[in-house]
Amino acid sequence: MAKTSRKRFTGWHMTGILVAFFGSVAAVNFTMASYASSTFGGIVVENSYVASQEFNGWLEQARESEALGWQAVTTWRPDGRLVVSVSEAPDYLTAQATARHPLGRKPDQMIAFTRIGEGAYLSDEGLPEGRWTLRLELTDGVSTWRREEDLS
């Protein structure tokens, strides 16, 4: 009967398996991390500690805005300009906004509005097509109303 020669499983074999396994895990992690960091171009907050200290103030501002009862609807015109229609608010308001690209790929744009009728405001300049987050602020000189909405 012929004797079969079988190689022994040594520590070098186990080392090779561990290096291959953890090397492939590390390669996948680095690849996913590079994809994640290349698609997120913005900063959520400059300083998370300072933001945490201001959070209750932001909640109070949101409650005050909600208590005003003002309602606003934003629509996009074919020429790229925005129309904000406001109801349940005083006749004369000042409207302004900041448009942020959600992925930070385009610079923030400050938007000024001109009153075009009762409760209607038209942006002075157009906004390029795409996904934008609009931070709208309306004020009557005494009270300020704020809202953030997604435009697409």
Image: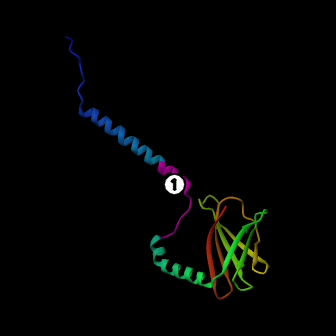
Is 144 within the magenta?
A: no
Is 36 within the magenta?
A: yes
- The secondary structure type at the circle numbered 1 is helix
Q: Is residue 18 above or below residue 121?
A: above
Residue at the spot 78% in from the left edge and 62% down from the top edge: 78
Residue at the spot 51% in from the left edge and 53% down from the top edge: 36
Relative to 14, is 64 on the left or the right? right
The one of 109 and 82 positioned closer to us in this rendering: 82
Q: Quadrant of the C terminus?
A: bottom right
Quarter where residue 136 is shown: bottom right
* Kind of residue indicated by mark 1: Ser
Quarter where residue 92 is shown: bottom right
* Residue bearing the label numbered 1: 37
Q: Which residues are magenta?
A: 32-47
Q: Residues within 10 Å of mark 1 (few under 14, many from 20)?
A: few
Relative to 118, is 88 on the left or the right? left
Question: Where residue 50 sits: x, y (%)?
Answer: 47, 75
Q: Quadrant of the N terminus?
A: top left
Question: Where residue 110 sits: x, y (%)?
Answer: 68, 70
Question: Where residue 35 sits: x, y (%)?
Answer: 52, 50
